[in-house]
Image: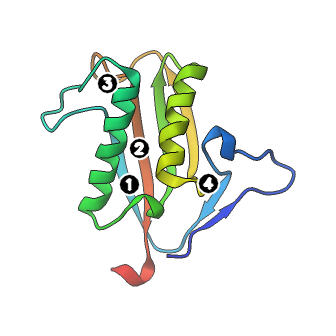
Amino acid sequence: MTRSIINPAGLHNPTNFGYSHIVSAPGEQVFIAGQYGSDESGHVVSDDFAAQVEQAFLNLRTALASVGLGPTDVVRIGTYVVGHDQAKLAVLLKHLQGTWGTDLPAQTLIGVASLALPGMLFEIDAVAVRPSDHR
């Protein structure tokens, strides 16, 4: 797949914040619902933010793999953080850069008061693109 990452002149370099301004890719869009730090039964794995982020990223990889895709096929993510602060941003950046390096997807990070289930502290959704020649 040809995925183009564009961080245009005139806009700040967003990679230190964990995202790219623009990602363009040809092909079929695949939408991954919010993944959180849950085990296979849907229970939150820990009350620790870092543990939940790690599990959510593992769950995202599992969802992508189930449709024959991987992180490099992701063009946009949404991240939702309960009680967002700089310490939580550092944890998230570690996982973003560990997953995508400097070729980061477009991202919107939203600080929220709560998420769908008690104890959830983090959630990530994604839009991936299946390459046109990969159907």
Residues marked 2 and 3 touching at CB (< 8 Å)? no
The residue pinned by badge 3 equals 116
Q: Earlier in the sequence, mark 3 or mark 4?
A: 4
- Is residue 117 positioned above or below 53 on the image? above
Residue under the point 68% across and 41% down: 16
Q: Secondary structure at mark 4?
A: loop
Residues marked 3 and 4 touching at CB (< 8 Å)? no
Could you give the CA–CA distance between mark 4 and mark 2, rounded to whole angstroms? 19 Å
Query: In the picture, which quadrant includes the C terminus?
Result: bottom left
Q: How far from the left and from the top, in percent, is residue 85? A: 57, 19
Could you give the CA–CA distance between mark 4 and mark 1, rounded to whole angstroms? 22 Å
Could you give the CA–CA distance between mark 2 and mark 3, rounded to whole angstroms? 14 Å
The residue pinned by badge 4 equals 102
Residues marked 2 and 1 touching at CB (< 8 Å)? yes
Q: Secondary structure at mark 1?
A: strand
The residue pinned by badge 1 equals 31
Q: Amino acid at mark 1?
A: Phe
Residue under the point 44% across and 80% down: 132
Residue under the point 52% across and 38% down: 94
Q: Amino acid at mark 2?
A: Asp
* Position of residue 131 in the picture relative to residue 86 (left or right): left
Could you give the CA–CA distance between mark 2 and mark 1, rounded to whole angstroms? 8 Å
Q: Earlier in the sequence, mark 1 or mark 3?
A: 1
Q: How far from the left and from the top, in percent, is residue 1? A: 49, 76
Instruction: Examine the image and state in which quarter residue 2 appears.
Output: bottom right
Residues marked 4 and 2 touching at CB (< 8 Å)? no
Q: Secondary structure at mark 2?
A: strand
Q: How far from the left and from the top, in percent, is residue 113? A: 46, 15
